[in-house]
Image (cartoon, grey):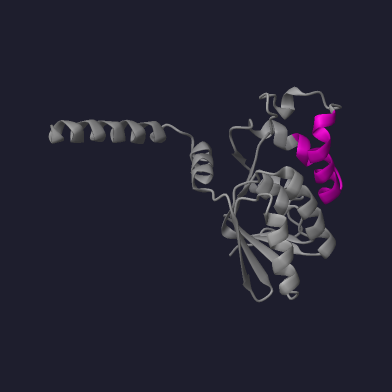
Amino acid sequence: MKKKISLIILSIMIVIVGVFAFIPQSRMMAYSVFINSKEITEFRVDGEMLFMNGEINSKTPKQLKKVVSENPQITTIVMLEVPGSNDDEANFPMCSWIREQGLNTHLTKESLVASGGSDFFLAGNERTMEQGAKIGVHSWSDTSGTEAKDLPKDHPDHEMNRKYIEDMLGKDDFYWYTIYAAPANDIYFMTEEEILKYNMVTQPIENP
């Protein structure tokens, strides 16, 4: 009986491995990101650097403002793995506050940001990254499942996201790019050429 159960478990594992073998690398990475994401945001101060890790949520703005107020020497937020935001209504005002404070954002060669995390990166007054860092983008969808790309360009539901991008980058072309890059349930990781094209960084990409 135990042998039979073991064979069943082994068969299931083989099927799972087989499925993953046929998933494109970009989608495999997206799956890994969202499975491993934490529904909390962690901050760690090291001199002028504030290291950030985890998903952005409604409590993150209060956390961030508290740690910055207690550590006025902070100049740069180093984003490690920030796979997204579950509260854009909290994320966008916080990002605007970061820009007002003149704080910078930075991605290490091992950093991975996506969705609302990519929006957060744009808040930096100076935005720098090392080769190897990953920036993921996709469309958004509403509670009915309607995706941004399916709405006409003048639809009011675009405005919050579009206006944020325009405020951070001076124009909104990056917003329109993101909603066609991947559907809401997937992630597309930008190439270095695309990152430079849309002025995601303010300095040349660093070779660590």
Q: Nearer the viewer, residue 206 or 33?
A: 33
Q: Position of residue 7 (x, y in %)?
A: 19, 32
Q: Position of residue 194 (x, y in %)?
A: 69, 44
Quadrant that contains the N terminus: top left
Location of residue 90 with respect to 18 vertically, above or below: below
In the picture, residue 178 is in which quadrant? top right
Q: Is residue 198 visible?
A: no
Which residue range is magenta in the image? 156-176
**In the displayed structure image, the side of residue 33 where residue 6 appears, left or right:** left
Q: Position of residue 53 (x, y in %)?
A: 59, 58
Residue visible at 35% across and 33% down in the picture = 16
Q: Is residue 194 visible?
A: yes
In the picture, residue 42 is in which quadrant? bottom right
Q: How many marks?
A: 0
Q: Nearer the viewer, residue 17 or 50?
A: 50
Tell me which secondary structure the magenta stretch mostly adopts: helix
Residue visible at 73% across and 29% down in the picture = 148
Location of residue 65 with respect to 29 vertically, above or below: below
Residue visible at 66% across and 49% down in the picture = 57
Quadrant that contains the C terminus: bottom right
- Residue 164 falls inside the magenta stretch: yes
Q: Nearer the viewer, residue 36 or 165?
A: 36
**In the displayed structure image, the side of residue 21 where residue 206 appears, left or right:** right
In the picture, residue 185 is in which quadrant? top right
Q: Position of residue 164 (x, y in %)?
A: 81, 45
- Residue 128 falls inside the magenta stretch: no
Residue visible at 77% across and 64% down in the picture = 103
